[in-house]
Amino acid sequence: MSKSILTVDDSTSMRQMLAFILKGAGYQVVQASSSDEALSQAASRTFDMVLTDQNMPGGDGLDLVCALRALPAYADTPIIMLTTESSEEMKNKGRAAGATGWMVKPFDPNRLLEVVRKFVN
Amino acid sequence: MAVDLKQFRGAFFEEAREHLAEMERLLLALDPTNPDTENVNAIFRAAHSIKGGANMFSLAEIAAVTHEMETVLDAARKARLRLSGAIIDTLLRGCDFVRAALAQAGADKPADGVRAAHITAQLRGLAVPDAPPAKPRARLELAWPGKGKRDPRKVKKLVADVARLVKLEPGALGALQADLMAQGKADITLPEGTDASRFRETLAFVLPEDCIRVPAAQADFGFFEENLPKQRPAPKPAAAEATKPAASENLSIRVNAEKIDRLINLTGELMIGYSMVRSGIGAAGVDHLGMALATVERNLRELQEAALSIRMIPIGGVFARFPRLVHDLSAQLGKQAELRIEGESTELDRGLVEKLIDPLTHLIRNSLDHGIEPPAARVAAGKPARGTIWLRASHESGNVVVEVLDDGAGLSRERILKRATEQGLRADEAMSEAAVWELIFAPGFSTATAVSDVSGRGVGMDVVRRNVRELGGHVAVSSEAGNGMRTVVRLPLTLAIMDGMELAVGNEVYIAPLSAIVESLRPAPGDLKSIANESRVLNLRGEIMPVLSLAKALGTEHACKEGEEVLVVVENGGRRAALAADALLGQQQIVVKNLEGNFGKVSGVAGATILGNGAVSLILDIPELMRVALGTEPHARAA
């Protein structure tokens, strides 16, 4: 059975692109447009990986990472933050929240797949 | 794998347009002397989102301009920059550029680089002098020499040594120590203006050279070693609990408009088919199917309502453009005016929405140009210097009512009469107020003394009325000298379906919209009187109104004699007339089919439908028939 990835971003075009890239590589993709929606999805099934935007209205990516890590099913799930800034401050916050890694936007689709394949294939 | 991301640009354009609309709305509502921080934040986030997408799709000019806007907004929200009307205007111009550039990108045309550079320079000029310039600072990667367990004291000493040589950010020392202990390597960020390779030489005093690396390029991804699977420490207590998903207040999806139209068309066809079944069954008199039929009919009506309601969208979308128009135009005309909007959530058929833009734009321009006086004149008249224009929408018995009001000078009876006489229109002092106001709807009419390029070209109110008529509605004005003017536009809620009264005229069946019918009657002989040129009038309980024979107006033959007709009293624009038909056949809810695609405009008729027996029935254009009845238009004849 193919692996499932939860993508979280408030931008429809970004979600569509991620879905396109990931589905093309054979992954199952579920989209969420907000932190709340993502948690709702995460509660109904266990994804193999989570990719999340940082800047979203409502709960941001860091909040989502914290909340996911509090769920037993997601203690070890690879969670990657997609962010427009890669400052030390942001990285430290991501690390503290429990994110597995980060990737800067705009990103190279092949690079994204590289990172994803490192954890799920 | 070659990934073509261009296909997602469409979605980005839509999103960006929404962000732009939000930015403009908030910018216009901002009070520079006391800006709402939440709103400034929202504008900032919107600019940031557009920038992100622009970068993703290589739209360099949009990215550059939104980046500058973002910088200004960031400074504003952090209170490092005080907003002013001029700054807001510059930001609005930035929005205009982005909107234009999006349109160009959508049409695969290149953006205007010169304009982009211009706007960028203007935005940069707004930046605060002490804003920290965002230059990426050089970094070095340090590795702990040697393998095996690291001695905390030795790590601490190294960190102290490094600190003496490099001025690090507060907190960086702790991170350096933690990283070296945990992972055996760490990054440090060098102070501004420091050259990484030169510093490497300096650090070589305390670390072996091969433990100091200048990263080849700023890494665009990375991992937190301690959070990698299988190495995770015990789950930390969550800072935020897993929140329950908020009740979706406004859950919505995007649907292709063509799909909606097809769905609605199908429900219409279904209704027609159902009518045929019902009339077929009725004729055969099979009663026990009555219950089944009633159920199907109920379901069909609900389906139809649901489908039609999909086409309904809030009028606020159309209204949203007008604050900007008023803002810019009032400045241009040297007037002060404020636009107040009410009833934005009033829904109407999406087919109507686009077509309302032109007439409403003209009405608002009119108010600003001719209605609202210059500030000095207003103050002299005891009014506040700033005029107000109201834009209101509401529902009223099956219609959407849109009003434009202003507290300006109002219509001038004398000027209108004078101008009408000049133009050779019928105008005299004895005319009632309503009749005088009607004059402004004459083609080419305008009382503007100088033709301003805004609205005085004299192509105004007659075009507005024509546009509104085409939508099946009508427009009227009223005014009070010195106090202002009010324009009311009434439109049917939807063009697609209607309650109608079937009228028999000769061998034909016509439909009259139920909303226009006041009453129907068989007149007593004394109530009808003939007057000049074969016209007749009806005396209905003291009210006199013209009688129009539908047979004559539509070119069919009456089946019954004069005097055995049934009269249907209709009302439109405050006037009444009686239409003479052979018989009333009953009420029907009908699906309106537009004729114009196939036949062009047909006199006296505003569409068609298919009856239960499969015959085509034409829907009467009540406003036009009334004009014939009132003698303001020559007789219409259907083809």
Image: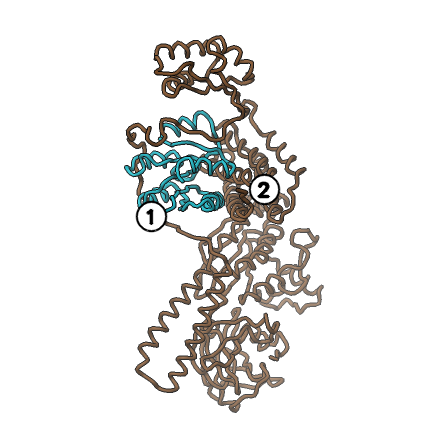
Amino acid type at image mark 1: Ala
| Along the viewing direction, whichever of B320 and B63 lies nearer the viewer | B63
| Position above or below: B241 against B493 | above
The residue closer to the viewer here, B307 or B607, is: B307
Q: State the CA–CA distance, disc 1 to disc 2.
A: 34 Å
* Chain represented in brown: B
Report crowding for label 2: few under 14, some 14 to 19, many 20 or more residues within 10 A (C-alpha): many
In terms of sequence position, does the residue under pointer 1 or pointer 2 come before the other? 2
Question: The chain drawn cyan is chain what?
Answer: A
| Residue A80 position within the rendered picture, expressed as x and y whole percent measured from the top left | 41, 35
Quarter of the image for the C terminus of chain A: give it: top left
Residue B185 in picture, x, y percent from top left: 42, 19
Q: Is residue B241 left or right of residue B357?
A: left
Q: Is residue B298 above or below residue B290?
A: above
Secondary element at tag 1:
loop
- Which residue occupies 64% across, 44% down? B332
Look at the image and tell me whether residue B10 can be seen.
Answer: yes
Residue pictured at 61% horizontal, 68% vertical: B431
Protein chain holding label 1: B
| Residue picked out by circle 2 | B98
| Residue B467, quarter of the rendered image | bottom right
Above or below residue B523? Residue A72 is above
Residue B387 visible from this viewpoint: no
Query: Tag on residue A29?
Result: none
Q: Is residue B336 rendered to the left or right of residue B252? A: right
